[in-house]
């Protein structure tokens, strides 16, 4: 038996699961020894992730989908521990494993920050369980087993969010995450129960086979429930409120996994339900997804611009990028409903490519941010500055991540955003009804979003690494250790590689689309040199050509610069700026100052508030101020207008009415159970 | 003859559940429960003679030992220890209680439970009586304020479930049945300890007095 057959066998798949299970339990076993717990947690997560990458590549290449079932757990009538891995699942297993691999390598060094402060064994346990949960989610074949895996993933990530439990805000973030994600799960469960009601099965494949038995009204309700449920996990606005709090609260290599891949499990399920199980969705589904994507992308980047907390800024960018991915899915849905599968595939390829790319550059950015925060001991960007001198490699990797997320060529973000644009342009060109205006608007706002993202990362990189240091702590900062740098370097390399070989990656992703009955046909072609052609020459881009052009331009600029510097120059004397005063960090533009003008443009949406504080040298004589401070705040309109009123309403009802049910009388409680039982039995007869 | 034993046993199980709602003396209720459990053992014995499964005989012996001897003994000791001759008051008086029991018996035979009773096939009427026993026992727990009566209600409810399982062909593997009996045995022991603790704390076994627990 050749190696690939062994890996793709049931034993091979169980080995993948077992590696993470070993990692979880062995780190728990050595919880009293920080070094050993770190060693076992990291060793098994690295081994498992590396094996996962190989498994996913082989599963992707497999001509038939893979099916595994664990008999010991499959005797129940409705529940079965079964896995179904088609090309879509294989792609997500690849993405999860790839990012987990480098986050785990990074973790070896990063976890040392927690020695003797927090329990390393429990971190290792939940970290490995978290990865295991994500892998099970994207490969589960049975609905009930999927929900079990979903819950394992959610609970493990919840415990990772509150890992640094001594900080109260982390506990608060964890509570918000726990509540929001379970509200989402409630929607998902109702959607699945409806699928079961009409198809009579909890097996995804049987549900797909019998999907035509579901009435249109029920399909629409299932779509809305699934979109809200999985949208909550993905962080789609307005279900996103947990995300900016929870992602920064977790340790940085976990934040990278949460932001990079966990939220994509929601995207995976959206693709699976909307494009695989339901074929020929109504037009309004795609339109709604497009609107949600556009809103999430634009508002995500605007909120990111207002942030001073580096990790929260990155978290908001995840919302923005989920929006961009939704634009691809929305396009695919619209084209599918218009029976244009070839162009639909373009949207899906764009969405999948951006999923992979966002996972890569966002985890890179979170890991870089983790190195910065671990060195400077604060997340407040206003206290950074000049870190490039102390963390040169980290700064370089952050810059690559920032360029990739800002969609600058030749990095991967450019390739997937270009494909998303092409998908939207296709809608504007080939659709004759009013929906085309939605595509035009989405394309316009995506362009604005991209511009704002670039501005945001100019702010983030500039405030963090350039100019002068704004706090004393920075002088003692040292570059990160090898494992941290290796994790970041590998992801930076991948960001460039996925950009450079975007043609090849797009071709591979076209196979996923084809597997979902969306052959790309003439909608996308890739030449031998890696040039991507869209819609029979409607547009084309060559990442290698851009790369070589840029490399030549940089090289030529460098030569010219060196020549100019070395040639004899005249020394001229001019007026000294600011009377010769030394430059100090106080003269630098702050992150607030940088983004203020943009915030004021969008003040209708962002609702900024300004607090000016002045301290005087002499309290009785207000002529000589000691200091002036301006605090620019942003109103949380989602909490103010949606969640707080909802919370008040529920509290009101609970206090005034529902509390009466809780009488403290055991007979009454048993009566409720009895009546509920009778009601359920009665309902079953209808 | 064998069929007659079966019918008498069923009658005893059902009537015991009805009378448990009507009587006030705790010791009589315990005796009734022991009698009901004996009838359940008799029904199981009937099936033993049909199948000749020695494991089933072991289950019958265990059922008899735990439900007809050990549980009543524990409950009797508890009643004597705390001088709980009579059960605490009920929410409904006797006529209304009997009316409710009649209504529940009718509901058990109505179409609401047809999807459940159909499982029993030919023994559909027996399954309906078993459901009536379950509902009546449930009602006993709701209507009585005394903890001893509620405990007997739970045990009678369990008898009703076993009774239903036998006629609907849902009886589990003997190993599982032994586990269930062991569960009841442990439950009786723990509940007895809890009852004593509650009596010591509150000086009464009226569950309505336990409202104070929430404060």
Image: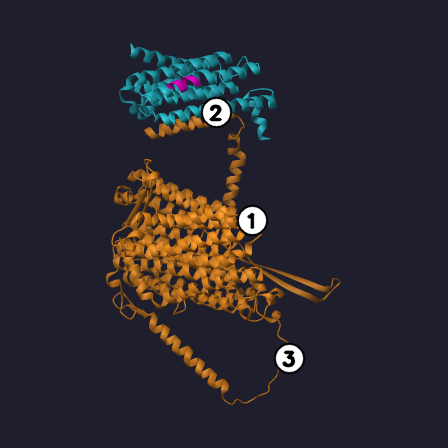
Chain colours: A orange, B cyan
Q: Position of residue A218 (x, y in %)?
A: 32, 42
At label 2, counting other C-alpha atoms closer than 10 Å, the crowd grade (few under 14, some 14-19, many 20 or more) is some
Q: A509 above or below A196? A: below
**At numbered mark 2, what does the secondary structure look like: helix, strand or loop?**
helix
Residue A294 showing in the rendered view: no
Q: Are marks 1 and 2 in contact (CB under 8 Å)?
A: no
Q: Residues within 10 Å of mark 1 (few under 14, many from 20)?
A: some
| Part of the protein shown in magenta | B60-65
Distance of mark 2 from mark 3, alpha carbons?
Answer: 88 Å
> Distance of mark 1 from mark 2, alpha carbons?
38 Å
Residue at point 49%, 88% (across, down): A567
On screen, A562 above or below A639? below
Q: Nearer the viewer, residue B122 or A463?
A: B122
Q: Nearer the viewer, mark 3 or mark 1?
A: 1
Give the CA distance from mark 3 to mark 1. Answer: 49 Å
- Quadrant location of the C terminus of chain A in the rendered image: top left
Q: Residues within 10 Å of mark 3 (few under 14, many from 20)?
A: few
| Picture residue at 39% right of the left edge, 76% below the top | A551
For label 1, the residue is A165
**Residue holding disc 3:** A580
């Amino acid at each position: 038996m050749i190696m690939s057959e062994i890996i793709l066998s049931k034993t091979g798949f169980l080995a993948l699961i077992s590696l993470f299970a070993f990692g979880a339990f062995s780190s728990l076993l050595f919880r009293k020894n920080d070094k050993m717990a770190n060693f076992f947690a990291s060793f098994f997560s690295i081994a498992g992730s590396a094996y996962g990458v190989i498994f996913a590549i082989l599963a992707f290449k497999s001509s038939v989908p893979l099916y595994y079932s664990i008999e010991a757990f499959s005797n129940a009538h409705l529940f079965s521990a079964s896995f179904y891995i088609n090309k879509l699942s294989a792609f997500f297993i690849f993405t999860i494993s790839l990012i987990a691999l480098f986050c785990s390598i990074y973790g070896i060094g990063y976890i040392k920050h927690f020695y003797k402060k927090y329990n390393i064994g429990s971190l290792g346990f939940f970290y490995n369980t978290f990865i295991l949960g994500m892998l099970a989610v994207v490969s589960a074949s049975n609905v009930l087993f999927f929900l079990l895996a979903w819950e394992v993933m959610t609970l493990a990530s919840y415990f990772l969010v509150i890992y640094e439990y001594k900080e109260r805000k982390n506990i608060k973030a964890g509570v918000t995450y726990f509540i929001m994600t379970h509200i989402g799960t409630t929607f998902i469960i109702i959607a699945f129960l409806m699928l079961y009601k009409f198809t009579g099965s909890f097996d995804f494949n049987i549900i797909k086979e019998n999907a035509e038995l579901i009435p249109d009204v029920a399909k629409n309700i299932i779509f809305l429930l699934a979109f809200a449920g999985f949208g909550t996990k993905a962080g789609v606005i307005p279900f996103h409120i947990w995300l900016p709090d929870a992602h920064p609260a977790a340790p940085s290599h976990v934040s990278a996994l949460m932001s990079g891949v966990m939220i994509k499990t929601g995207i995976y399920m959206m693709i699976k339900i909307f494009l695989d199980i339901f074929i020929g969705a109504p037009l309004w589904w795609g339109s709604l997804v497009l609107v949600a994507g556009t809103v999430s992308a634009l508002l995500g980047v605007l909120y990111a611009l207002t942030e001073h907390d580096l990790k929260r800024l990155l978290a908001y960018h995840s919302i923005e990028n989920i929006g961009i991915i939704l634009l691809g899915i929305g396009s695919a849905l619209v084209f599918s409903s218009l029976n244009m599968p070839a162009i639909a595939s373009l949207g899906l390829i764009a969405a999948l490519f951006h999923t992979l790319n966002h996972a890569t550059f966002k985890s890179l950015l979170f890991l870089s941010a983790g190195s910065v925060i671990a060195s400077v001991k604060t997340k407040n960007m206003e206290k950074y500055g000049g870190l490039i001198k102390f963390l040169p490699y980290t700064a370089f990797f952050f810059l690559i991540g920032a360029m990739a997320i800002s969609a600058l060529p030749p990095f991967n973000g450019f390739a997937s955003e270009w494909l998303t644009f092409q998908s939207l342009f296709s809608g504007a060109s080939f659709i004759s009804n009013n929906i085309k205006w939605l595509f035009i608007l989405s394309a316009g706002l995506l362009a604005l979003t991209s511009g704002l993202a670039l501005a945001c990362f100019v702010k983030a990189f500039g405030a963090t690494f350039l100019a002068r240091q704004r706090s004393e702590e920075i002088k003692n900062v040292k570059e990160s250790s090898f494992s941290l740098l290796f994790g970041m370097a590998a992801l930076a390399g991948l960001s460039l590689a996925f950009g450079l070989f975007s043609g090849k990656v797009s071709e591979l992703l076209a196979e996923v689309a084809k597997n979902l009955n969306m052959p790309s046909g003439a909608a996308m072609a890739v030449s031998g040199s890696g040039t991507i052609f869209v819609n029979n020459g409607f547009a084309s881009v060559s990442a290698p050509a851009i790369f070589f052009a840029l490399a030549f331009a940089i090289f030529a600029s460098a030569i010219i610069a060196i020549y100019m510097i070395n040639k004899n120059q005249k020394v001229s004397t001019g007026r000294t700026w600011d009377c010769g005063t030394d430059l100090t960090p106080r003269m630098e533009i702050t992150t607030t100052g940088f983004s203020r003008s943009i915030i004021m443009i969008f003040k209708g949406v962002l609702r900024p508030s300004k607090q000016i504080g002045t301290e005087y040298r002499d309290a009785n004589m207000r002529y000589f101020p000691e200091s002036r401070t301006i605090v620019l705040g942003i109103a949380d309109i989602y909490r103010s207008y949606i969640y707080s009123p909802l919370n008040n309403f529920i509290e009101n009802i609970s206090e005034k009415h529902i509390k009466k049910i809780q009488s403290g009388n055991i007979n009454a409680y048993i009566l409720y159970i009895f009546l509920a039982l009778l009601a359920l039995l009665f309902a079953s007869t209808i | 003859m064998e069929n007659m034993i079966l019918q008498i046993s069923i009658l005893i199980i059902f009537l015991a559940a009805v009378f448990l709602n009507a009587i006030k003396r705790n010791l009589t209720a315990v005796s009734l429960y022991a009698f009901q459990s004996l009838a359940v053992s008799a029904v199981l014995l009937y099936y033993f003679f049909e199948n000749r499964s020695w494991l089933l005989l072991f289950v019958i012996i265990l059922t008899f030992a735990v439900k007809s001897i050990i549980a009543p003994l524990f409950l009797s000791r508890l009643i004597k220890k705390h001088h709980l001759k009579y059960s605490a008051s009920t929410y409904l008086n006797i006529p209304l209680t009997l009316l409710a029991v009649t209504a529940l018996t009718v509901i058990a035979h109505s179409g609401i439970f047809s999807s459940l009773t159909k499982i029993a096939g030919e023994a559909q009427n027996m399954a309906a009586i078993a459901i009536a026993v379950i509902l009546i026992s449930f009602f006993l727990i709701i209507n009585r304020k005394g903890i001893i009566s509620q405990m007997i209600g739970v045990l009678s409810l369990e008898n009703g479930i076993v009774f239903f399982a036998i006629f609907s062909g849902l009886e589990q593997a003997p190993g599982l049945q032994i586990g269930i009996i062991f569960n009841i045995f442990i439950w009786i022991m723990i509940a007895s300890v809890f009852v004593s603790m509650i009596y010591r704390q509150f000086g009464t076994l009226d569950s309505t007095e336990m409202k104070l627990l929430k404060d």
